[in-house]
Image (cartoon, helix red, strand yellow):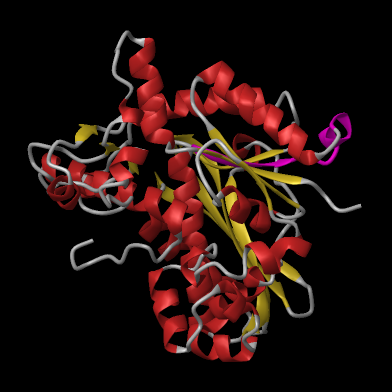
Amino acid sequence: MSRVIFHIDVNSAYLSWTAVEQIKNGSSLDIRTIPAIIGGDRASRHGVVLAKSIPAKKYGITTGEPVANALRKCPNLHMEPPDHKMYRRYSQKLMEFLRTYSEEIEQVSVDECYMDFTEAAARFSSPVEGALELKNEVKHRFGFTVNVGISSNKLLAKMASDFEKPDKVHTLFPQEIQVKMWPLPVRELYMAGRSSTETLKKLEIYTIGDLAKTDPAILELHLKSHGRRLWEFANGLGEDRVESEPAEAKGIGNSITLPRDAVTEEEAKEVLKELAASVTRRLKKAGQKAGMLSVEIKYHTFESVSHQRQLAKATNREEDVYTEAVSLFLELWNHQPIRLLGIRSSKLSEESEPEQLSIFDIEVEPEEKRKKREQIRKAMDELRGKYGKDVIHKGPGY
């Protein structure tokens, strides 16, 4: 029996939660009904758009664009600063409610999760009926809306939840791919970021269907292992196992089974870079730092080995995790072909916990500049989590 997987995504989460909180505190204005954004600072015109209202979208304002651009498009734009503590509170309430339907929940960011609805589906005439009840109950209880995507694996459920918004339920089962997914622009495929999309356009690949019908060997030639992964996604191939064990119990990690064995250090480093970005993004979403890091290698013979290290200082910075992971990998690898790579963080601590600094850690960068740099990094992580790892490219100095 195939599984029933839901992907549940809060519509414009930061903006919706801010609106609900303001109304709860007596505001007569619902910022969801006017041109409004979350992110940045009006006085300095710095920062990027983290979330936007539907009226703001009508001005051509896009998530991830500089606030200065958004203000040029709509001078009367209403702006609110992000409040990550409040977001975590609403997220926790939502997850507690969703667990009344199924304990099998994998939270992938503060505003989205996967749910294995297979057992719960027996209580309803169809998965769609169950999703509609869940969606409507969220709106009634909490005052914000969600989209629910339904399929037999996580990839297709996520693609389905990104169809028309807000407050909708969509299905995307394997038999529906050719009709519902293949006509879409290739940029709408999960993990198809800007640079990948530009490469695909040069190959005259414009739709997800074009990509699905392309020889994966050609894609690998131009995009390495990421090309084959995109080809698999275009053909609806994805994982159906929902990782429901709490992050606190086992740490936060990720692994990738490679479509073709990695045989060079450069290939392995590319995968480790992708894994480090994913793991640190999830650490930051959970408000956690890691004190221990481990790397796992599964060889083409299916032999598995791992190596771990206590970190000198707890971290959730992508550069730190990547550097440590590469070091662990090079100590561990025996130069045999690699089938799977994984990074796992453990010994987690709260991000807000004070650090014990050595004399070498004393801040030489001005505090204001350091805070601004951290805000930019956090905004970039949030955008990559939503729109893929290459939605933003770092310039010099970051």
Question: Extreme left residue here?
Answer: 43
**Whether residue 124 can be seen here:** yes
Asked if the stretch drawn in magenta spans residue 80, the answer is no
Residue at the spot x=39%, y=11% of the render? 24
Tally of marks: 0
Identify which residue, 34 or 10, lies in the foreground: 34
If the image is split into quadrants, where does the C terminus sit? bottom left
Q: Position of residue 207 (x, y in %)?
A: 53, 75
Relative to 323, does residue 41 appear above or below in the rendering? above
Residue drawn at x 69%, y 55% as measured from the top left = 172
Residue 228 in sight from this viewpoint: no
Q: Is residue 119 magenta?
A: yes
* Quarter residue 136 falls in: top right
- Point out residue 240 in the picture as x, y percentages from the top left corner: 75, 54
Q: Residue 113 or 131: which is nearer the viewer?
A: 131
Residue 126 falls in which quadrant of the image? top right
Q: Position of residue 347 (x, y in %)?
A: 54, 41
Residue at the image point whose x is 36% and y is 60% from the top = 319
Q: Is residue 27 left or right of residue 218?
A: left
Q: Which residues are magenta?
A: 110-124
- Where residue 368 appears, as percent x and y from the top left, is 12, 40
